[in-house]
Amino acid sequence: MTITKTLTSWYSIHKRDLPWRNTTNPYYIWLSEIILQQTQIKQGLPYYEAFVNNYPTVFQLAKAKESQVLKLWQGLGYYSRARNLHATAKYVAYELHGEFPKNYKGLLKLKGVGDYTASAIASICFNENTAVLDGNVYRFLSRYFGINTPINTTNGFKTFKALAQEILDKNNPAEHNQAIMDFGSRQCMPTNPDCTVCPFKESCVAYNKSLVAALPVKLKAKKPVKKYFNFLVFISSSGQTILEKREEKGIWKNLYQFPLIETEKATHLNDFKSKLKTYPLLNGENYELILFNDTDIVHKLSHQHLHTKFWIVNLNKLPTSGIPIKNLRDYAVPVLIEKFIDDFNF
DNA sequence: AACACGGGGAC
DNA sequence: GTCCCAGTGTT
């Protein structure tokens, strides 16, 4: 029995019924693949439904404003995916007349489409023999073949990509690729897989050498840096507040937030008050300052831990142009801000 | 080659 | 707390 026959036999019983499994339309496959990058299916599924419903074709996505696309993406993270999604939709709609490239090489040129996504679309939509290599495939291959090369290195990528390509079913790459990913996700899972029911238990190197928990090998990530954020939540007597768009590159680009003052360490009421005396927006203004959260809210991201205070600034008239508080929810904001808006009773 | 980029969920 | 998730782009 070949690997691929065992995989597809397993897949015929255990495959999940997912909305993008019933189509080979590259627009829908592309949409699902971008949404699922570094994202579990359970988390991405409602976003896929929302995008399909709001933008049934690439032309409608192309016509949308980026702010609308980011609003629909709100909460999913890695927002460059949404910005690249929109840019690519415009490119496909207006430069390629709505037709996605029909092979790996062409797909790879699209913004937000890398080796994995190009391989997935090329195989699923166009039956091109390009093996996918995602977290699930890394895990299965490293265990089955007993390979301890770290997966998050250039050498690891080359090694596992070549192996994935070697075992790819050249007669049915679409089925093979989806089967191997589902298998990694549902049978050969990261922790405590039930290897006693695994169809590969006779030949799996990791299982037979008790290396399942040790594979795959992955180089350690850096520790996240701590940052100290102070958001100024302006509230005017006419019910307005101030939102700013994050224009600079980096985290949350093109999302909105309350005016932010970042400090080197945690602040307290009195030193923050004196700090505000040199803050341009509040220079010479009369206002009342109230700290919303007594203890810092710690928002944990992969690379940053954000220790956050929300300062309520009550005043008669805003020092600059603002927006009605009732319109706050029209703007795409980070989850940290969204949670505050939910918790604070405006 | 190393790093930045979100947020949720499992253990 | 640690690790992972249908990875990609930048430096």
Image (tube, coloured by chain):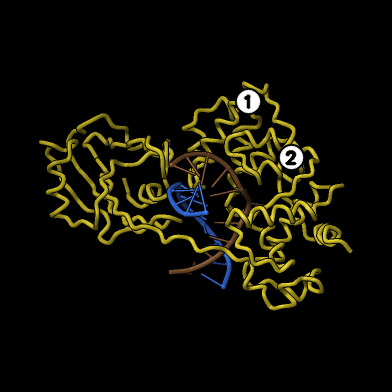
Chain colours: A yellow, B blue, C brown
SS of the residue at dot 1? helix
The numbered dot on residue A59 is: 1
Q: Is residue A290 above or below residue A219?
A: above
**From the viewer's perspective, is A286 left or right of A166?**
left
On the picture, is A242 further left or further right than A180?
left
- The chain that hosts pointer 1 is A
Which marked residue is nearer to the observer: mark 1 or mark 2?
Answer: 2
Q: Position of residue B10 (x, y in %)?
A: 58, 67
Q: Give the x, y percent position of residue A136.
A: 67, 58
Q: What residue lies at 80% left-to-right and 52% top-to-bottom? A: A168
Asked if the residue under mark 2 is in contact with the one under mark 1, i.e. CB atoms within 8 Å, the reply is no
The residue at the point 27 percent across, 57 percent down is A293
Q: CA distance from mark 1 to mark 2?
A: 21 Å
Q: Hey, what amino acid is under mark 2?
A: Ala
Disc marking residue A214: none
The quadrant in which residue A139 appears is bottom right
The residue where tag 2 is placed is A122
Q: Is residue A161 above or below residue A79?
A: below
Residue placed most toward the observer, A190 or A76: A190
Q: Is A153 or A292 nearer to us in this picture?
A: A153
